[in-house]
Amino acid sequence: MDGLEDRKTKPGLSGRIRQSQLWKSVFRVGLPLDRRGRLRVVIHNFFLHLHPARVATSGLRMTYTFCLGGISAFLFVVLTVTGVFLMFYYVPETGRAYADMKDIGFVVPFGRAMRAMHRWAAHLMVVTVILHMARVFLTGSYKPPREFNWVIGVGLLVLTLLLSFTGYLLPWDQLAFWAITVGTNMAAAVPLLGHEGPLHDLLGATVDNDVRFVLLGDVEVGATALIRFYVLHCVGLPLAALVLMGVHFWRVRKDGGISRPL
Ligand code: HEM
């Protein structure tokens, strides 16, 4: 009888934990079962509030988005983590960049795995971003009110391609050297801004002041191009992508969540 009384008056272990000051300082709101209460829990929790408080069931259907945007974002995280590990060993200097890549492949513990993950994730991200764009187009999700997010998406596509292009030079092997030579020669043929392009006279573009020169920092691929591509690849472009992704995800929420299938 005494035991029963005790159970009625004293809360159990989980009850005592949930009533402690420590628990209450972390979780301000309990776990209510009603809809309004559940919304409050999501809004007051740092990790949960990153997600929308309400999601349409149709938006959760795997076959609508194929999670292609989410997979692209995940690959970006993989690229950042593996890229930072590669930065510990790689020095963007013409005399040692190639040797550093070889060391990463043959000497550094797990170096080969890190580099392979970085390369595979980079190739995959280009594929998933293009497929994501195709999904958005085919489901008509670019239409109002999501037209601005489509434009942000185009920015993200360009940044993804530029990240691939700038990373291409870093191994500093024959493939890298000639690929970037060809790629930047194409910039020389851009109208107005390239010294070989149509109307180049109008702005006075020459071999040592045109858009190709800005990219390379020189009239041909060399040490200045390597450091420029390295800084763009490791700092400038990832930061720009991070900012645009933040705006992109925020807009998905503000535009009423993921669009509904017809
Ligand atoms: C780094 C590249 C990108 C990332 C990480 C990304 C991420 C995402 C994520 C997570 C979503 C939520 C729905 C989903 O997973 O499909 C989304 C939606 C959307 N994305 Fe992207 N995206 C990227 C590139 C693009 C591109 C290239 C476009 C188009 C040019 C685009 C346009 C849109 C639009 C319009 C929506 C809203 C779709 C809807 O409501 O159904 N995104 N994106």
Image: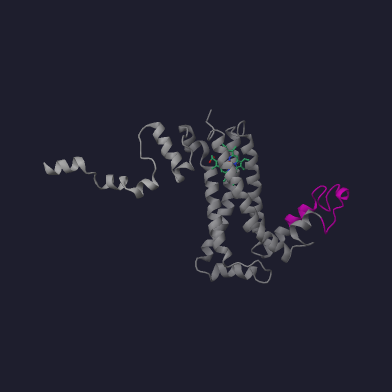
Ligand 1 found in image quarter:
top right
Can the viewer see residue 249? yes
156 in relation to 54, above or below: below
Q: Nearer the viewer, residue 25 or 134?
A: 25
Q: Is residue 203 magenta?
A: yes
Q: Is residue 206 left or right of residue 242?
A: right
Magenta stretch: give its range. Answer: 182-209
Residue displayed at 41% across by 32% down: 36
* The quadrant where residue 30 appears: top left
* The quadrant where residue 151 appears: top right
Q: Is residue 240 left or right of residue 18?
A: right
Q: Pinpoint residue 187: horizontal percent, then vertical percent.
A: 77, 52
Q: Pinpoint residue 15: horizontal percent, then vertical percent.
A: 28, 44
Q: Nearer the viewer, residue 118 or 59?
A: 59
Q: Pinpoint residue 257: horizontal percent, then vertical percent.
A: 53, 35
Q: Pinpoint residue 133: horizontal percent, then vertical percent.
A: 60, 40
Q: Is residue 85 left or right of residue 199?
A: left
Locate the N terminus by quadrant: top left
Can the viewer see residue 115? no
Q: Is residue 240 left or right of residue 197?
A: left
**Dominant secondary structure of the residues highlighted in magenta in the image:** loop
Q: Is residue 107 magenta?
A: no
**The furthest residue to the front:** 21
Residue displayed at 15% across by 41% down: 4
